[in-house]
Amino acid sequence: MVNNKLLIISYYWPPSGGSGVQRWLNFSNKLVKMGWDITVFTAENANYPILDKNLEYTIDKSVKVFRIPIFEPVGFFKKNNTDNIKSSSFFSKIILWFRANLLFPDSRMFWIKKVSSEGIKYVRENNIDCLITSAPPFSTHIIGLNIKKETNVKWVSDFRDPWSDFFQFKFFPMSSFIKNKHLKFESKCLNFSDTVITTSPSLTEKYSLKNSNSFTITNGFNDTIINNETNKFLIMYSGVMKSIQNPVNFWKVLSEICKENHDFSRDLVVRFIGDFDTDILNSNDIKLIESKIKFENYLDKSELDIEMSKARVLILSSVNLDSVDNIIPGKLFYYFSFNRPIIAFSKLNSDVSDIISKTNTGRVFDYSNEIDLKNYILELYSNYKSKKNSFNPIGLSSFTYNNLSKNLNDLLKKTIK
């Protein structure tokens, strides 16, 4: 029996670290064991914000990886500290305008021509059954569109985030012409795709209006990680946190409880591991609890697993924008592997809220609810002091990469029929 051949185009791939790389790294490793012949096209010498070289050792040896050189002006932005979308300096505003209006669809646009050419050639010479492109960056979907038009290969477009509604675009000084161009290419890619995958039910519902063959396959997690008990009431967060995610009330409530409860103040430790906007680090709200919180740099995933296993409570913070409710942070599923209660900040009618409610994995608070937040933190602290474990999650197995990959396997087989 000849294995079905799959070509995956993903900008994020080891040695890239962070949550963006985990999705197709794990799916690839699972799918090869299900009989798929997998090739991955990724970027050579990419300007990844996070590196985790240990992840390269986790790639299944059966997965063929080709690295295609990329030119990224984003390196210039970072070198000159002009990549902060909220910076008020004149030079930063000029650079931001340049990024928003001249680099379409994003700063990886210079990768499109080369990868499209290589992809068309590879599909034809190797009789590829199915092409998958994963975005952001949305340049990968334009690559997929080019390959689809030239070869008519079956194409699955994977949207880890919405395109035209991408939350960062809301801070860009983007012209109406470019906004419409994003909408136009988003529609083209949706219409030309044989199958569309998204990571959230709300986005699937929206994209189904353009392509009825749209499905949700969320991000996931692998194995449950054994908790490493400490003698502190340790609250932890991992990953990126932008200013628009800052849970201001969280800091205020912790400060208030510390003033009222000396035992709580003595037992509390807060660790945030990852990359945080300077607006957060310098926030007056953070200063209210400065002695209790430690901001730490990224760790390799193997090290991060060990540190996160010590947490008593995990923090999740979505984007605090009224129009954003269809993004599920990948770290939610990573958190599931620790069997610890989650305090999440999100809109109450969001996909995040729905999943946490259905899985009984914590509580979700909007960005203005201080009273209920305070009571829930005190409830978790009381459980910690009495050594009571009231955490009883439901249905987490459906979010393991093993089970998600079975769903993906079925979807791919239907696509190439």
Image (tube, rainbow, N blue to C red):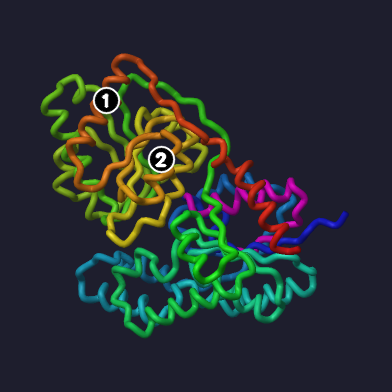
Relative height, residue 41 to residue 145 (above, below): above
Residue 13 in picture, x, y percent from top left: 57, 56
388 relative position to 128: left or right: left
Name the residue located 32 percent from the left edge and 82 percent from the top edge: 175
Relative height, residue 146 to residue 49 (above, below): below
Q: Quadrant of residue 142?
A: bottom right
Residue 243 covered by magenta stretch = no
Relative height, residue 166 to residue 357 (above, below): below
Stretch in magenta: 19-42
The residues tagged by marks 1 and 2 sit, at their Cα atoms, a distance apart of 18 Å
Relative height, residue 256 to residue 285 (above, below): above
Name the residue located 29 percent from the left edge and 68 percent from the top edge: 171
Residue 125 in picture, x, y percent from top left: 79, 73
Q: Is residue 133 visible?
A: no
Which residue carries the number 1 mark?
A: 379
Name the residue located 57 percent from the left edge and 45 percent from the top edge: 54
291 relative position to 387: left or right: left
Residue 148 in picture, x, y percent from top left: 66, 76
What amino acid does circle 1 point to? Glu
What amino acid does circle 2 point to? Ile
Residue that protrudes farthest toward the left in the picture? 259
Q: Nearer the viewer, residue 336 or 276?
A: 336
Q: Sequence-wise, which precedes: disc 1 or disc 2?
A: 2
Question: Where is the N terminus found, in terms of image quarters?
Answer: bottom right
311 relative position to 24: left or right: left
Callout 2 secondary element: helix
Callout 1 secondary element: helix
Residue that protrudes farthest toward the right in the picture? 1
Name the residue located 64 percent from the left edge and 52 percent from the top edge: 408
Which numbered tag is attached to residue 356? 2
Q: Quadrant of residue 327?
A: bottom left
